[in-house]
Image (cartoon, coloured by chain):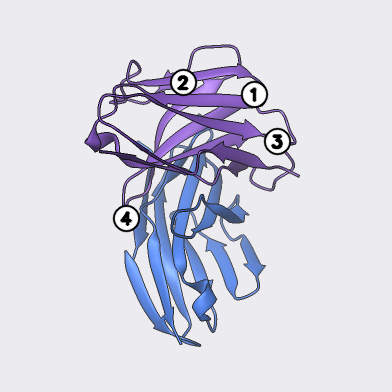
């Protein structure tokens, strides 16, 4: 059964304090692993897609990496505006739907 | 581009009434749309997949008679919550497949449903 687990559930960081969010996944065949940002009361906003182990993508203060079992979202020198819930999702080769993790709620304190 | 418009953004209804939520792809044709439900501090749970012109495929545990999905055109899918009850209060989000996006999918902005 395809499964996605994210940790930690919640993370509080001081502004400038770098950290990483984890996404562990089990999928029969990985078509893609996705990271989204979700602000309260809004739909998910696309950040990255990773397709194969060893792949890395960067965007501003965010960097996503992928291994065969997990993905990390590294946040370097975060700012208060990075506060949001970060969702990880996978698509398997056997279907079109996404399987989402429960998310990590990030709060960056000024 | 790829924009999905979801309407309404929030709705309050009385218990026992029905509510319709619309999901439109504005600048692309979406042959497949997905409907998700998200409870507070929980992740998005797929409810059903709808394909244009055919019956929706519901995930296990989702009542198809309660959550009616219609995908009559390539740009519009609707979710009707029938005989709503307070436990149906949730955040409903649609997603459309298609458009020029890196992930191939575009999410709507969600609908907050409160049943009183």
Q: Which chain is purple?
A: B
User: Which residue occupies 44% across, 59% down?
Assistant: A40
User: Which residue occupies 35% across, 36% down?
Assistant: A1
* Crowd tier of the residue under label 1, counting other residues whose Cα lies within 10 Å: few below 14, some 14–19, many 20 or above: some
Residue to which mark 1 is pinned: B31
| Residue placed most toward the observer, A17 or B86 | B86
Q: Give the answer, above or below, for where B6 lies relative to B33.
A: below
Cα distance in 3D space between marks 2 and 1: 14 Å
Q: Which mark is residue B69?
A: 2
Q: Earlier in the sequence, mark 3 or mark 1?
A: 3
User: Do marks 4 and 3 share a chain?
Assistant: yes
User: Do marks 3 and 2 share a chain?
Assistant: yes
Q: Earlier in the sequence, mark 3 or mark 2?
A: 3
| Residue placed most toward the observer, B51 or A8 | B51
User: Do marks 1 and 4 share a chain?
Assistant: yes
What subunit carries mark 2? B
Cα distance in 3D space between marks 3 and 2: 19 Å
SS at badge 4? loop
| Residue placed most toward the observer, A106 or A98 | A106
Q: Which mark is residue B79?
A: none
* Crowd tier of the residue under label 2, counting other residues whose Cα lies within 10 Å: few below 14, some 14–19, many 20 or above: many
Cα distance in 3D space between marks 4 and 2: 25 Å
Quarter of the picture holding the N terminus of chain B? top right
SS at badge 1? loop
In this figure, what is the number of numbered marks? 4
User: Which residue occupies 39% across, 57% down?
Assistant: A103
What subunit carries mark 4? B
Residue to which mark 4 is pinned: B41
Q: Which mark is residue B26?
A: 3
Cα distance in 3D space between marks 1 and 4: 30 Å
């Amino acid at each position: 059964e395809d499964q996605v687990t994210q940790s930690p559930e919640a993370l509080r960081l001081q502004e400038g304090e770098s950290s990483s969010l984890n996404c562990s996944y089990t999928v029969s065949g990985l078509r893609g692993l996705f990271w989204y940002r979700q602000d309260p009361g809004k739909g998910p906003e696309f950040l990255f897609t990773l397709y194969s182990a060893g792949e890395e993508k960067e965007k501003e203060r965010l960097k996503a990496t992928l291994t065969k079992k997990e993905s990390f979202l590294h946040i370097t020198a975060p700012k208060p505006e990075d506060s949001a819930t970060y969702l990880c999702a996978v698509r398997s080769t056997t279907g079109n739907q996404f399987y989402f993790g429960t998310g990590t709620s990030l709060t960056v304190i000024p | 581009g790829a924009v999905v418009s979801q309407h309404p953004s929030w709705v309050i209804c009385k218990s026992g009434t029905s509510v319709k939520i619309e999901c439109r792809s504005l600048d692309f044709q979406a042959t497949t749309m997905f409907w998700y439900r998200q409870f507070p501090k929980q992740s998005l749970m797929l409810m059903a997949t709808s394909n244009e012109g055919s019956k929706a495929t519901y995930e296990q545990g989702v009542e198809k008679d309660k959550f009616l999905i219609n995908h009559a055109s390539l740009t519009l899918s609707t979710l009707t919550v029938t005989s709503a009850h307070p436990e149906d209060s949730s955040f409903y989000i649609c997603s459309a497949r298609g458009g020029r996006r890196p992930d191939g999918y575009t999410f709507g902005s969600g609908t907050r449903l409160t049943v009183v």
